[in-house]
Image: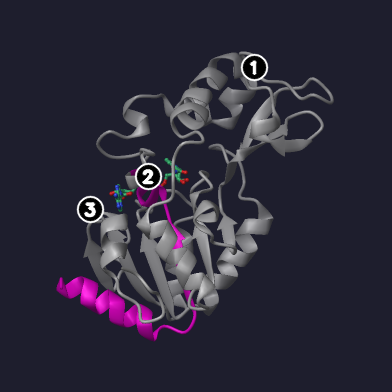
Amino acid sequence: MDNAIAKATRIISEGRRIFAFTGAGISVESGIPAFRGPGSVWERYDPRNLDIDYFVQHPEKAWPVIKQIFYNFMGSHAQPNAAHRTLALMEAAGHLDCVVTQNIDGLHQSAGSKRVHEFHGTASRVVCLGCRHTMPAAEADLSPDVPRCPLCGAVLKPDFVFFGEGIPADAYEPSSQAARHADVCIVVGTSGEVMPAGMIPIEAKRCGATVVEINTTPSTFTRSITDIFVQGKAAEVFAQIRLPYIDRP
Ligand code: NAD
């Protein structure tokens, strides 16, 4: 077994208060491209479409791009992979306190994770910019160029955090708390470049946690706070992490 995987397995097996901090990389093997890196979203689309001021001023330009990225190819077909599933099994076995995710794809919940703090909200809901009514995206009529609220007619927006928006308090507080109390933080598939999300593992490290990082390439965390860096694809790495309390073929 790879030395880094063996070390990561030991640290995770011995951890008492473990949480995972995940980013777009954990869902790449489920078919959802990351924002940065080869084949990523920003190579194909202008990030300005996810800027809140631009969206409010030009919803007719931003919505078609948003639909392509988040409701067509991210859409409903992606399935959780071995990384999402292992984290869900760890939680079910009482060995993972929670997942703090920057992802908006809902794959942790699809895998069975219950305590998921969605730091950047979710694409599975839309919110009205007028009356703040929220509803499942699946129940909204997204077919018009600019989808509108069924109650007041104002523009609908995906209920995830756009550039220029704040972090939902109901995600920020429990994420920060998990970081302060953890003895192990498993960082998976994130560049660490998006703030303030990137402060969560830093906070965990500052409060004494051992940081195990899984990524295909070194991130901003690798040289600064990571104790064990496992280089590889998230689903492949998790498939090799054998934990005594998880039955796997
Ligand atoms: P990012 O795009 O900035 O970085 C992705 C990271 O994943 C990179 O460090 C890359 O090396 C790594 N990676 C790529 N493939 C991997 C694999 N198979 N296994 C492990 N690691 C892999 O993503 P971010 O740091 O999460 O920040 C971007 C923001 O955009 C976040 O808010 C993120 O949630 C959001 N986003 C979400 C999704 C999603 O919900 N699936 C997709 C794209 C972007």
Front of the two marks 1 and 2: 2
* C-alpha distance separating marks 3 and 1: 38 Å
Q: Amino acid at mark 2?
A: Ser
Location of mark 1 (residue): 146
Place of residue 115 in the rendered image (x, y in percent of width and height, measured from the top left): 59, 64
Picture disc at residue 231? none
Are circles 3 and 1 on residues that touch, CB within 8 Å?
A: no
* C-alpha distance separating marks 1 and 2: 29 Å
Left or right: where does residue 201 sit relative to residue 64? left
Query: On screen, 210 above or below 73?
Result: below
Place of residue 52 in the rendered image (x, y in percent of width and height, measured from the top left): 59, 31
Location of mark 3 (residue): 217
Please tell me whether mark 2 sits on a helix, a strand or a loop: helix
Q: What's the residue at 36%, 31% (across, down)? A: 42
Q: Which residues are magenta?
A: 1-28
Q: Amino acid at mark 3?
A: Thr
Of pointers 2 and 3, the one earlier in the residue sequence: 2
Q: Is residue 17 magenta?
A: yes
* C-alpha distance separating marks 2 and 3: 18 Å
Position of the C terminus by quadrant: bottom left
Can I make out residue 199 in this image?
A: yes
Q: Within 8 Å: ligand 1 and the Cβ of disc 3?
A: yes
Of pointers 1 and 2, the one earlier in the residue sequence: 2
Please tell me whether mark 1 sits on a helix, a strand or a loop: loop
Q: Which SS type dominates the magenta stretch?
A: helix
Q: Amino acid at mark 1?
A: Val
Location of mark 2 (residue): 30
Q: How many marks?
A: 3
Q: Residue furthest left?
A: 2
Can I make out residue 19 in this image?
A: no
Residue toward you, 230 or 130: 230
Q: Within 8 Å: ligand 1 and the Cβ of disc 2?
A: yes
